[in-house]
């Protein structure tokens, strides 16, 4: 694995924990330290590309303590190494610092997480819904959002050709 | 009101009121699929572009939480429908990594051939459409003629031309026969000529070069900062290819090069795709001559693939095995953990982040869609170009809206 000395210096020895499953090496960081962690990984550890940013709703996941998990997948484009940074957010404070100042590529990915889960990213330049219409009120990828049934779509006004 | 020339001259440039807005799409032949751009123009120069997406959003990731690992492949198919099998292979690559299934050598080789056919499939359309959008229609027809042959090969193996749903956890739906191998061989033999023809039609074509050279330049730093992968990143000098970095399937055994360019413009992306096609043909040539014999699917101890019908009806073990897989409270033994696995799809890194909760369906099936991430690049590289360059850049990014919106 990569040299974790800069990360240990930045976050302190108890600032993060690690785990591994198959070849995925994961860092678990508290939500308030996640920006420091990402900045350190980008600037001191060479993980210069944000491959993916997504979230998971652990509402009824076996053994889960936190409601939402946010995962950052990073890639070192020189060595090809990957690392996965995981953090947890809970209601009512569904807020995380935005990574757009580190990676411009985070822009749309954070908008998608906001769109689907309602997690806000403070400092994001343009945090709007991206895939769903602006009038949409729910967060469809949350586990308490049903797969089918009468939803927001049925409340939209029906526009006939004569009115349009 | 009639338009007067002095209206423009009198407009105060400091207020920028002379800028006008153009809606590009959602239904426009050059977007190929349904996406909308709101362009702010200064004359013909694009000052600002705001993409508006989501027209094809159909909740694929939500469906992924309700279908089991084998069923979801039918949905994954419909993401990047230009290269459907590449999506299936990526999805089951992630599932097999989650379950810890090691594929048989025969399956690894067959999937490699199919993945490379899909790369040809995608690049042919992209190169052909790049010509089409810039007014060179012939190359498009040449490309589509070859795509038909690939459809035939895929149909011969899976029974479906388009949405094949051919892969299964731990194997493939059907095995292939010698006739299929013959079809692939003759395709490989004939492809070089078409490739040369497209090359002759476009690569030194003066109009094509003037419309693509220096257009939509993406620097190496930008490419890394904007999370670009695949041909887009390689055309900007980012030497990364998952087939080499983390060899999956049979790529470790085969000899091929990673194609890179430095310029980062539309022309470089075109050249990278053209050369990648040659490499794909090389890979298929090697793989098709070395398909190992032996079983296609992982064995019964792996308990992942449905047994054959003769086994189900004639042996008690086969019957139990079948029931173990299809009963709603049984199914594939998944761990309670999460994994990210990616493959080098024709368009870039196509990854799946699967969270499993011990049942046979994903608790969360996140797709890392290359189209989505590459389209975010568009507003950054269009600024300062002419409105006609919008088309050239869009086609060089290869945006597939079904994957963009999922």
Image (tube, grey):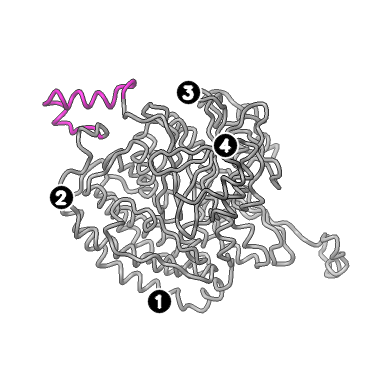
Mark 3 neighbour density, 10 Å: few (under 14) some (14–19) many (20 or more): few
Q: Secondary structure at mark 2?
A: loop
Label 3 vs 4, first from the N-terminus? 4
Label 1 secondary element: helix
Residue A138 sits above or below residue A75 on the image: above
Say whether residue B166 is left or right of residue A51.
Answer: left
Please say if the residues under marks 2 and 1 sit with CB atoms less than 8 Å apart.
no
Mark 2 is surrounded, within 10 Å at the Cα level, by few (under 14), some (14 to 19) or many (20 or more) other residues, namely few
Q: Is residue B310 left or right of residue B119?
A: left
Q: Which residue position holds label 4?
A: A14
In three-dimensional space, the C-alpha distance between marks 3 and 4, rounded to whole angstroms, equals 23 Å
As drawn, the label of residue B200 is 1
Is there CB contact under 8 Å for labels 3 and 2? no
| Nearest the eye: B15 or B229 | B229
Q: Are marks 3 and 4 in contact (CB under 8 Å)?
A: no
Numbered tag placed on residue B125 in the rendering: none
Is label 4 on the same chain as label 2? no
Q: Magenta span covers which residues?
A: B305-330
Kindly indicate the quadrant of the structure image that contains residue B374.
bottom right
Whether residue B374 can be seen here:
no
């Amino acid at each position: 694995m990569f040299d974790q000395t800069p990360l240990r210096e930045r976050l302190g020895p108890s600032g993060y924990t690690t785990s591994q499953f198959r070849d995925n090496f994961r860092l678990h960081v508290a939500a308030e330290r996640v920006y420091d962690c990402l900045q350190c990984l980008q600037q001191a550890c060479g993980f210069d590309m944000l491959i993916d940013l997504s979230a998971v709703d652990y509402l009824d996941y076996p053994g889960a303590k936190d409601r939402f998990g946010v995962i950052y997948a990073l890639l070192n484009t020189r060595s090809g190494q990957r690392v996965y940074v995981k953090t947890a957010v809970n209601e009512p404070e569904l807020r995380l610092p935005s990574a757009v100042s580190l990676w411009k590529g985070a822009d749309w990915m954070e908008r998608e997480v906001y769109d689907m889960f309602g997690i806000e990213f403070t400092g994001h330049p343009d945090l709007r819904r991206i895939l769903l219409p602006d009038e949409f009120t729910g967060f469809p990828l949350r586990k308490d959002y049903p797969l089918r049934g009468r939803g927001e779509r049925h409340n939209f006004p029906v526009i006939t050709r004569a009115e349009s | 009101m009639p338009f007067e020339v002095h209206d423009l001259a009198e407009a105060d440039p400091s207020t920028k009121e002379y800028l006008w807005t153009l809606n590009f799409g959602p239904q426009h032949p050059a977007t190929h699929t349904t996406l909308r751009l709101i362009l702010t123009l200064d004359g013909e120069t694009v000052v600002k572009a705001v993409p508006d997406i989501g027209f094809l959003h159909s909740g694929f990731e939500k469906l992924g939480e309700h279908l089991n690992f084998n069923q979801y492949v039918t949905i994954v198919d419909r993401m990047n429908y230009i290269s459907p099998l590449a999506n299936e292979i990526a999805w089951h690559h992630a599932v097999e990594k989650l379950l810890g299934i090691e594929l048989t050598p025969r399956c690894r080789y067959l999937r490699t051939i199919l993945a490379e056919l899909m790369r040809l499939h995608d690049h042919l359309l992209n190169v052909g459409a790049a010509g089409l959008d810039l007014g060179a229609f012939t190359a498009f027809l040449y490309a589509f003629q070859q795509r038909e042959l690939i459809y035939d090969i895929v149909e011969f193996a899976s029974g479906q031309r388009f949405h094949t749903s051919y892969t299964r956890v731990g194997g493939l739906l059907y095995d292939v026969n010698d006739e299929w191998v013959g079809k692939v061989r003759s395709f490989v033999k004939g492809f070089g000529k078409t490739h040369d023809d497209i090359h002759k039609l476009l690569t030194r074509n003066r109009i094509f070069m003037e419309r693509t050279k220096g257009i939509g330049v993406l620097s190496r730093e930008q490419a890394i900062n904007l999370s670009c992968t695949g041909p887009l990143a390689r055309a900007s000098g980012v030497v990364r290819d998952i087939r080499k970095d983390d060899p999956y399937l049979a790529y470790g055994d085969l000899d091929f090069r990673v194609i890179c360019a430095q310029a980062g413009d539309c022309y470089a992306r075109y050249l990278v795709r053209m050369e990648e096609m040659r490499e794909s043909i090389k890979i298929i040539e090697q793989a098709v001559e070395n398909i190992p014999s032996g079983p296609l699917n992982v064995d019964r101890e792996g308990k992942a693939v449905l047994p054959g019908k003769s086994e189900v009806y004639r042996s008690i073990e086969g019957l139990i095995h079948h029931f173990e897989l299809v009963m709603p409270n049984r199914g594939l033994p998944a761990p309670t953990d999460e994994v990210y696995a990616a493959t080098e799809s024709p368009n870039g890194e196509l990854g799946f982040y699967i969270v499993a909760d011990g049942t046979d369906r994903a608790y969360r099936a996140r797709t890392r869609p290359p189209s989505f991430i590459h389209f975010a690049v568009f507003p950054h590289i269009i600024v300062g170009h002419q409105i006609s360059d919008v088309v050239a850049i869009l086609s060089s990014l290869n945006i597939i809206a079904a994957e963009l919106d999922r």
